[in-house]
Image (cartoon, rainbow, N blue to C red):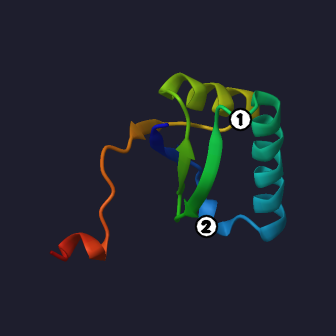
Amino acid sequence: MPKYVIERVVPGASKLTPTELKAMSQRSCSVLNQMGTQIQWVQSYVTDNKLYCIYIAPNEEVIHEHARLGGFPANHVTQVKTVIDPTSSEE
């Protein structure tokens, strides 16, 4: 199943408290449970004013549906085409 990177613009994201981040995570998981196994949240990275989330889903529309149901922004959704890491440099 395809993997996606979702850019969410959240002004002041890095200033969210652990309680606020927990509530956001719980809301996301609740929506994911409603949607079933067709979408999976892998992890998210919090930066100053954005969240970058990694999801596995059958298509981009499912990603947008999750965002709509959860009340999250999904400003830019990009499908991952290839993953590289330090082992990619090895022969």
Measured Cα–Cα span from mark 2 to mark 1? 30 Å
Q: Which mark is residue 14?
A: 2
Relative to 87, is 14 on the left or the right?
A: right
Looking at the rendered structure, the secondary structure element under dot 2 is: helix
The residue positioned 29% from the left and 63% from the top of the image is 84
Number of numbered markers? 2
The residue positioned 45% from the left and 38% from the top of the image is 2
The amino acid type, in three-letter code, at marker 1 is Thr
Marks 2 and 1 in Cβ contact (< 8 Å): no
| Mark 2 surroundings: few (<14), some (14-19) or many (≥20) residues within 10 A | some
The amino acid type, in three-letter code, at marker 2 is Ser
Q: Which is in the foreground here, disc 2 or disc 1?
A: 1
Relative to 90, is 45 on the left or the right?
A: right
Quadrant position of the C terminus in the picture: bottom left
Relative to 76, is 21 on the left or the right?
A: right
Locate residue 75, reporting x and y percent.
49, 37
Locate residue 77, reporting x and y percent.
45, 37
Which is more toward the observer, 1 or 21? 1
The residue positioned 57% from the left and 63% from the top of the image is 46
Which is more toward the observer, 20 or 91? 91
Q: Mark 1 = which residue?
A: 37
Locate residue 23, reporting x and y percent.
83, 54
Looking at marks 2 and 1 on the same chain, the residue that comes earlier in the sequence is marked by 2
Which is more toward the observer, 63 or 19? 63
Looking at the rendered structure, the secondary structure element under dot 1 is: loop
